[in-house]
Amino acid sequence: MAKILIVEARFYDHLNDMLLDGARAAIEEAEHKHETITVPGALEIPAAVALAADSGAYDAFVALGVVIRGETYHFEIVAGESARGLMALSMDGLPIGNGILTTEDEAQAIVRADRAQLDKGGAAAKAALAMLALKSRFG
């Protein structure tokens, strides 16, 4: 049984609740344990994953958050840099599922977050578990 850390950037509570619901359900369905921590924003997720990985307490990680395009360039920075940070950690061998939604508007985010629709929280958890299985396979 693996221990999975869900790291969420809770900016849109109702959307994060949907993402968390999907991620937790997928992890529990696979009969693994999970814990959730909250960070201020999507940019802080990779740093939190790195800090938690150094502790050795977790086997895999799920990153959850929602970034909705606004009127400034900030969207591109947050979306790109959070993804880049998670990819760098993945390339270092950490099993991570990236469930940070980057959407044009709230309606798109709802479709992606809702378990009854695209269930991107569940998909991110399943991706983390798949990468954990690969890590175990290749040692």
Image (cartoon, rainbow, N blue to C red):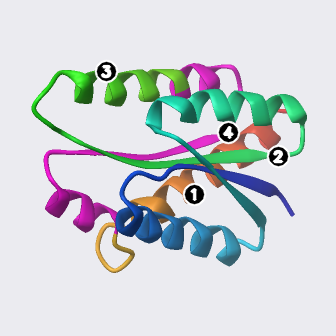
- State left or right for residue 34 relative to residue 87: right
- State left or right for residue 129 relative to residue 1: left
Mark 3 is surrounded, within 10 Å at the Cα level, by few (under 14), some (14 to 19) or many (20 or more) other residues, namely few
**SS category of the residue bearing label 1:** helix
Rendered residue at 81%/42% (across/down)? 136
Image spot of residue 31 (x, y percent): 76, 74
The residue tagged 3 is: 77
Q: Which residues are magenta?
A: 86-113
User: How far is mark 2 from mark 4, CA to CA?
Assistant: 10 Å
Looking at the image, can residue 138 be seen? no
The residue tagged 2 is: 58
The residue tagged 1 is: 125
In the picture, the disc for residue 95 is 4
Label 2 or label 1, whichever comes before in sequence order = 2
Closer to the eye: label 2 or 3:
3
Q: Are marks 2 and 3 in contact (CB under 8 Å)?
A: no
